[in-house]
């Protein structure tokens, strides 16, 4: 029999806010354990939640990027359960009126285009982290992550293969990064995914037994887990190797197997109810419109513009539109310099290399695009040599500098004093009669050696064309 | 008898006590529970800061019933309190007997209103959202209200002036202009017409209400009896909402981070269960079970959501009364005194006697207890209610 796979995803994304959702603690990743905590996010009695407006901004932004309807009155609810990483023994989330509903996302796979429907997006707070210390056989709790804002994006069961799941996740990641909603890093846990999966005979309209794999945190693991689960389900149906039950399973990526998680005797009841301490958030037209106006163009819209209007190659446009930071820097550099191809090259090649050296990703490009445009102009106007321009770029990664002022201060301005250039070239030529003789004897390489020596003496501050002419002139005179 | 959970000496002129649901930094806060025995907060309640800012000195923490949901303080782990053999909470005994300006107390289920009525004190339960709840031990957040208790209306109003006002640390507060309507000197329309809630008077000793009606007649204030049947639903609704919220709010006391931890556990489930079993009293456990059940799948619509609907219906009923009347007169207690024998006879008596206090608790409307009865008014009408209470103080006795 032929089977089809039915998959729905719940994707958790940590929002890129400075502070937590209900208190003013930092929401940044990577601090020392329990450094980002206060009585509120530690569950001490007496603190009251104050909603971080930025969280609602980003929740709305995510919804608009994913074509959702925005609930203009959205409320927070309490979800109760006991776990030591949850200091109040309840999580504040959205159960009755989530901020976004009814969205859709277009994906492209080898089978073509497809829309995946979004059921809802809700805002909530993250839980802390348990750290197990094998040495003392104890569990310690780190509350840095408690109350870090999340959105949970719940899809309809519209996905039918690992390929589609990956395409969907990559699309979510691209759109949310582009809108600066989240950095969406699986490896740091700022994007996590629960996979709900079942199979059924092809063409059937009845859903099969569903299993859920929680907290998947890499794309490749998700792919392997889906393939494994599909095979396990089919095996169970065809060969009766086991009885499928609705359950939560844990994926062990090292062993390449999923395991049933010990189910408690009683099913959990989260006892949701409206949080009386958080007033309903009412999104008026002004607020709604300001978020709508702040949305970026979709990456593919920018790509079309870059190739069709600016004449960039497909490759260059792809490279730029992989990162919102690249696009912003490119557009600012272009506005300043008027040179599209040059601006693209500096980012795709030179900036990318600099980021690489700094072990940073394309999203982390922070240099001033306008200053980059000024630098490009200095090079194209022969005011600064290319090698020196790269040094200026390196400085731009360290601080926001004015390229011209920096070039002047560091002696990077190209000299137009031909007399002075001639004097230096003459000295180089006289000091190296062997290379002169080699060049005259037909060895082209010897000219390059002389040229390099001259450029070094000139500290790079000379137009290469001008230098070449003066050099050949001096060799002929020698 | 344990009137104070913690106290300090003061030579200051204006001394007040706060009850033990209100967090203080230098004095311990226990909420009357073994769970928080010796608990020192890292921060103080906004009202404690506001009191100090207004020149008061907080000299002690008045004992309270566990999480303030009982009849009159009798469920405190640190012992029940009484006045001349009658059950009444510690704040009321202190205000009655000691040289203090008054007490700032935290109302969840009417224990303070009842105690003030039993001791013939003045209590103002202000409009919900006019006094910050920041730094109070959460009971049932949708109704929890910081109240003031004093011997006279003048002293009560002075305390109210000190604690009322906007606080950005409490997301449910009204704007400062609204809070200012409560304060002495703000303009108000005097009470001219009072509705008497018959449905509640029917199950109470009539003496105090009758005495107040006599005063109203003398003072030229019209009193009209209304059925007010719907108000009898407030008790069941508030008990459901209160227990549900309380169950969630006390779930933070799990023995993991602070407070009581059992010595008797082998794993995390036993740590939770035994800590809570050993540290919580019977009435609180009952409330936790009832509240948990009220929120459970299948019961949410039948119990909790029904409670929310009743809250709305009662609010609408009050609004209709206030179209015609300036205040509603109600009893506060069913009788003049309670003893431990009443508690032993009915462990859940506080969930029944709260029928008089729940209409104001569930709606967040202001109430003033005076002469053993209460006047419930529309939002921000504290000045008018206190004005009438002051006339009673002068002429009614
Ligand atoms: Zn915090």
Image (cartoon, coloured by chain):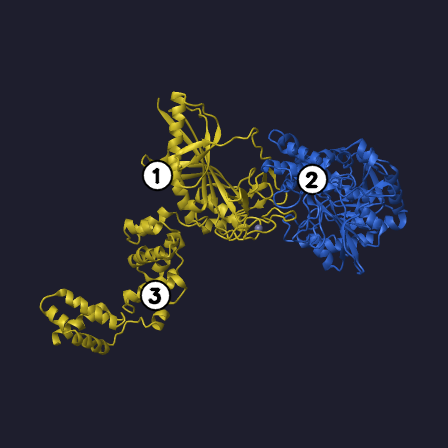
Chain colours: A yellow, B blue
Query: Could you tell me how many numbered marks the image carries?
Result: 3
Q: Position of residue B368 (x, y in %)?
A: 79, 46
In this rendering, would B250 be left or right of A259?
A: right
Residue extending furthest toward the front? A135
Query: Is label 3 on the same chain as label 2?
Result: no
SS class, disc 3: helix
Q: Nearer the viewer, mark 3 or mark 1?
A: 3
Towards the viewer: B168 or A60: B168
First-in-chain label (3 vs 1):
1
Q: Nearer the viewer, mark 3 or mark 2?
A: 2
Label 3–label 1 contact, CB within 8 A: no
Q: Residues within 10 Å of mark 2 (few under 14, many from 20)?
A: many
Q: Nearer the viewer, mark 1 or mark 2?
A: 2
Q: Which residue is mark 3?
A: A392
Q: Identify the residue at image location x=81%, y=47%.
A: B92
Towards the viewer: B242 or B160: B242
In this rendering, would A245 be left or right of B143?
A: left
Q: Is residue A125 visible?
A: no
Q: Using the image, tell me which numbered label, if any, was put on residue B279.
A: 2
Q: Using the image, tell me which numbered label, if any, was put on residue A108.
A: 1
Q: Position of residue A409 (x, y in %)?
A: 36, 73
Q: Using the image, tell me which numbered label, if any, was put on residue A14.
A: none
């Amino acid at each position: 029999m032929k089977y089809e796979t039915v998959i729905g995803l719940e994707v958790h994304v940590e929002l890129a806010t400075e502070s937590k959702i209900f208190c003013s603690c930092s929401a940044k990743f990577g601090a020392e354990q329990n450094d980002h905590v206060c009585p509120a996010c530690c569950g001490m009695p007496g603190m009251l939640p104050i909603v971080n407006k930025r969280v609602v901004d980003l929740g709305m932004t995510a919804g608009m990027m994913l074509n959702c309807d925005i609930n203009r009155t959205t409320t927070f609810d309490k979800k109760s359960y006991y776990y030591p990483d949850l200091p109040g023994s309840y999580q504040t989330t959205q159960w009755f009126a989530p901020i976004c509903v009814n969205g859709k996302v277009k994906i492209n796979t080898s089978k073509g285009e497809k829309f995946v429907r979004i059921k809802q997006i809700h805002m909530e707070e993250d839980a802390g982290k348990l750290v197990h210390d094998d040495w003392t056989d104890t569990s310690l709790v780190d509350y840095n992550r408690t109350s870090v804002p999340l959105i949970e994006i719940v899809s309809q069961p519209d996905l039918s293969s690992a390929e589609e799941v990956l395409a969907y996740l990559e699309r979510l990641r691209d759109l949310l990064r582009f809108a600066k909603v989240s950095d969406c890093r699986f490896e740091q846990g700022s994007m996590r995914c629960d996979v709900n999966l079942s199979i059924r005979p092809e063409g059937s309209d009845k859903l099969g037994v569903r299993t859920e794999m929680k907290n998947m945190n890499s794309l490749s693991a998700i792919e392997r887990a889906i393939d494994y689960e599909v095979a396990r389900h089919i095996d169970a149906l065809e060969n009766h190797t086991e009885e499928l039950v609705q359950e939560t399973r844990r994926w062990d990526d090292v062993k390449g197997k999923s395991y049933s998680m010990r189910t408690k005797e009683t099913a959990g009841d989260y006892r949701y109810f409206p949080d009386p301490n958080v007033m309903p958030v009412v999104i008026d037209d002004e607020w709604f419109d300001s978020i709508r106006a702040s949305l970026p163009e979709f990456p593919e819209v920018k790509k079309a513009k870059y190739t069709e209007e600016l004449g960039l190659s497909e490759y260059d446009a792809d490279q730029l539109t992989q990162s919102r930071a690249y696009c912003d820097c490119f557009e600012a550099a272009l506005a300043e310099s008027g040179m599209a191809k040059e601006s693209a090259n500096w980012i795709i090649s030179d900036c990318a290399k600099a980021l690489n050296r700094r072990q940073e990703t394309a999203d982390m490009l922070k240099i001033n695009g306008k200053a980059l445009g000024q630098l490009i102009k200095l090079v194209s106007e022969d005011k600064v040599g290319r090698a020196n321009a790269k040094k200026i770029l390196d400085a731009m990664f360290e601080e926001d500098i004015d390229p011209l002022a920096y070039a002047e201060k560091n002696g990077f301005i190209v000299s137009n004093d031909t007399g002075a250039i001639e004097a230096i070239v003459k000295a180089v030529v006289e000091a190296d009669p062997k290379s002169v003789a080699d060049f005259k004897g037909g060895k082209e390489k010897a000219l390059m050696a002389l040229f390099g020596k001259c450029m070094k003496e000139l500290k790079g501050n000379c137009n290469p064309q001008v230098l070449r002419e003066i050099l050949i002139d001096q060799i002929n005179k020698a | 008898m344990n009137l104070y959970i913690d106290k300090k000496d003061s030579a200051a002129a204006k001394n007040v006590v706060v009850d033990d649901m209100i967090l203080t930094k230098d004095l311990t806060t226990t909420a009357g529970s073994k769970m928080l025995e010796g608990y020192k907060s890292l921060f103080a309640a906004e009202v404690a800061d506001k009191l100090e800012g207004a020149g008061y000195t907080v000299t002690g923490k008045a004992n309270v019933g566990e999480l303030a949901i009982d009849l009159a303080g009798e469920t405190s782990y640190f012992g029940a309190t009484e006045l001349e053999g009658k059950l009444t909470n510690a704040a009321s005994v202190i205000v009655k007997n000691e040289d203090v300006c008054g007490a700032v107390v935290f109302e969840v289920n009417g224990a303070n209103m009842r105690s003030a009525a039993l001791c013939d004190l003045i209590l103002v339960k202000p409009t919900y959202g006019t006094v910050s709840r920041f730094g109070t031990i959460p009971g049932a957040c949708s109704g929890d209200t910081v109240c003031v208790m004093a011997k006279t209306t003048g002293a009560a109003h002075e305390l109210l002036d000190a604690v009322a006002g906007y606080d950005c640390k409490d997301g449910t507060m009204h704007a400062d202009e609204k809070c200012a309507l409560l304060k002495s000197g703000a303009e108000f329309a005097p009470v001219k017409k009072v509705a008497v809630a018959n449905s509640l008077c029917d199950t109470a000793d009539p003496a105090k209400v009758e005495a107040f009606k006599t005063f109203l007649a003398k003072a030229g204030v019209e009193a009209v009896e209304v059925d007010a049947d719907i108000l009898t639903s407030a008790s069941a609704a508030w008990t459901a909402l209160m227990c549900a919220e309380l169950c969630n709010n006390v779930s933070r006391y799990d023995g993991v981070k602070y407070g009581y931890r059992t010595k008797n556990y082998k794993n995390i489930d036993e740590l939770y269960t035994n800590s809570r079993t050993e540290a919580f009293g019977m009435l609180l456990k009952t409330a936790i079970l009832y509240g948990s059940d009220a929120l459970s799948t299948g019961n949410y619509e039948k119990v909790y959501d029904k409670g929310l609907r009743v809250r709305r219906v009662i609010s609408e009923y009050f609004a209709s009364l206030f179209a015609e009347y300036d205040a509603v007169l109600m009893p506060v207690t069913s009788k003049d005194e309670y003893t431990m024998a009443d508690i032993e006879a009915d462990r859940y008596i506080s969930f029944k006697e709260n029928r008089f206090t729940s209409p104001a608790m569930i709606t967040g409307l202001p109430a003033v207890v005076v002469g053993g009865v209460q006047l419930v008014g529309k939002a921000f009408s504290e000045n008018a209610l206190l004005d009438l209470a002051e006339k009673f103080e002068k002429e009614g006795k």
